[in-house]
């Protein structure tokens, strides 16, 4: 079995914030992924548990309620099983997952259809969770700007201010089915195909005992599992929040910060046997839930390289290990549109 990725765990509450920023930047350069130690200070554990409970309730809503919220070109709403295909070049069918994307909220109300199964206070709770994610993403953008010596130091944070205009930011609930003999029968069947994320950075929340995420290593061919509970975090109140760099921070830094390709796989078929034999390992056979917060700057944000000595010195280039990383467009909105068109063939087919 492939070895787990050696992604560092960072405690954002460390006294020496200069060091925290430095550690964060080094992890973002080396892996593109970093575990944020979860002590409940940035996002209370109850808020995460509560959001997972609402996600389950949402996906359990009657099919007709979910269908009435079907995802639109604004990237908000419900995406049915196999509807999205993150890696169309290599998948036979779409991703084995359901997803629900939430855009902005105003006064606790989503600005999009929500299944009536969700009570108004529950809808507001989702909005509040999205706000907590936003606050943490601003903090991370600030640390990344400081760690890279970007000028002005709040360059990234300023691009994410809500008063700059609408953004592609999405809070996404995800539900992946268990492996069965029909699902995952073909070796290309995957819960989420290989991709890099479209925004500036992503916060990912997972549940203990529900692995499946893998990252592509620099060699461009080895997949390495990302454990939910890495060593040293076993007794924390919740698994670490996983932060990863998306395409936009990679563009802004000319590829210095790594937008790492990743995917979500079904548990190996052999896992059932090894469990029967009493072997302990991080595996699961049930339905898998996760929540991703895709942080995007305002839509008109330009994606040229930021003023930073560190970025200027970097000669690595954009494309290493990531086929999407070639800069083709100028603004955040154009980039998002390009990526959505590639993964939602049905939604966009009339125009192709
Ligand atoms: O569910 C996960 O672990 C990751 C999902 C993901 O990569 C995504 O939605 O972009
Ligand atoms: Fe992703």
Image (tube, rainbow, N blue to C red):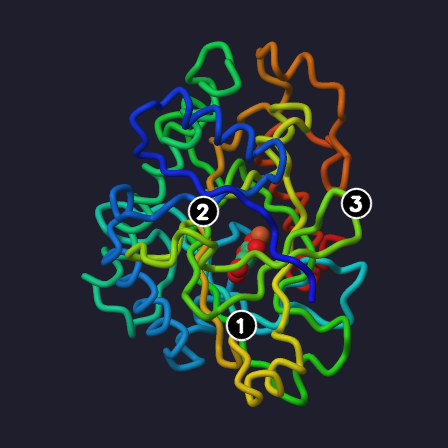
Look at the picture and state if 324 lies above or below 253.
Answer: below
Look at the picture and state if 146 lies above or below 81.
Answer: above
Find disc 1 in the rendering and name its residue.
Answer: 281
In the structure shown, which secondary structural element does the residue marked by tag 3 occupy? Answer: loop
Mark 2 and mark 3: Cα distance apart in space = 25 Å
Q: Earlier in the sequence, mark 3 or mark 1?
A: 3
Q: Residues within 10 Å of mark 1 (few under 14, many from 20)?
A: few
Find disc 2 in the rendering and name its residue.
Answer: 203
In the structure shown, which secondary structural element does the residue marked by tag 2 occupy? Answer: strand
Mark 3 and mark 1: Cα distance apart in space = 26 Å
Q: Residue at x 38, y 27 (%)?
A: 161
Can you tell which quarter of the image residue 302 is in? top right
Look at the picture and state if 338 lies above or below 266.
Answer: above
Q: Earlier in the sequence, mark 1 or mark 2?
A: 2
Depth check, mark 2 against mark 3: the one in front is 3
43 and 327: which one is in front?
43
Q: Position of residue 242 (x, y in %)?
A: 47, 48
Mark 1 and mark 2: Cα distance apart in space = 25 Å
Left or right: residue 27 versus residue 123 is: right
User: In the rendered image, which quarter contains the N terminus?
Assistant: bottom right
Depth check, mark 3 against mark 1: the one in front is 1
Q: Residue furthest left?
A: 121
Q: Pointers 1 and 2 in contact (CB under 8 A)?
A: no
Find disc 3 in the rendering and name its residue.
Answer: 219
Mark 2 vs ligand 1: CB under 8 Å?
Answer: no
84 and 147: which one is in front?
147
Q: Position of residue 40 (x, y in %)?
A: 26, 48
Q: Position of residue 267 (x, y in %)?
A: 61, 74
């Amino acid at each position: 079995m492939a070895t787990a990725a050696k992604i560092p765990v960072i405690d954002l509450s460390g006294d020496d914030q200069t060091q925290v920023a430095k550690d964060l930047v080094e992890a973002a350069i080396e892996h593109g992924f970093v575990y944020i130690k979860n002590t409940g200070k940035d996002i209370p554990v109850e808020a995460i548990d509560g959001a997972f409970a609402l996600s389950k309730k949402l996906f359990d809503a009657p099919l007709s309620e979910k269908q009435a919220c079907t995802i639109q070109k604004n990237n908000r709403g419900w995406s049915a099983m196999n509807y999205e295909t993150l890696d169309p070049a290599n998948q036979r069918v779409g991703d084995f997952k359901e997803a629900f994307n939430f855009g902005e909220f105003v006064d606790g109300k989503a600005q999009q259809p929500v299944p009536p199964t969700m009570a108004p206070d529950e809808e507001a709770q989702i909005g509040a969770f999205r706000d907590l994610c936003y606050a943490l993403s601003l903090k991370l953008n600030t640390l990344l700007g400081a760690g890279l010596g970007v000028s002005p130091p709040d360059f990234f944070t300023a691009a994410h201010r809500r008063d700059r205009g609408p953004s592609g930011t999405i809070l996404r609930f995800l539900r992946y089915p268990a492996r069965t003999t029909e699902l995952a029968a073909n070796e290309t069947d995957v819960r989420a195909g290989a991709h890099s994320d479209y925004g500036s950075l992503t916060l990912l929340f997972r549940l203990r005992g529900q692995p499946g995420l893998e990252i592509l290593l620099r060699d461009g061919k080895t997949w390495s599992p990302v454990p939910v509970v890495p060593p040293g975090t076993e007794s924390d109140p919740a698994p670490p929040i996983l932060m990863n760099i998306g395409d936009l921070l990679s563009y802004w830094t000319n590829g210095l910060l790594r937008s790492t390709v990743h995917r979500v796989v079904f548990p190996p078929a052999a896992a059932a046997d090894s469990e029967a034999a009493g072997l302990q390992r991080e595996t699961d056979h049930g339905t898998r839930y996760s929540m991703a917060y895709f942080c995007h700057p305002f839509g008109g944000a330009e994606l040229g390289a930021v003023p930073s000595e560190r970025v200027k010195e970097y000669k690595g280039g954009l494309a290493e290990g990531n086929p999407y990383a070639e800069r083709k467009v100028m603004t955040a909105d154009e980039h998002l549109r390009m990526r959505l068109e590639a993964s939602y063939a049905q939604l966009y087919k009339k125009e192709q």
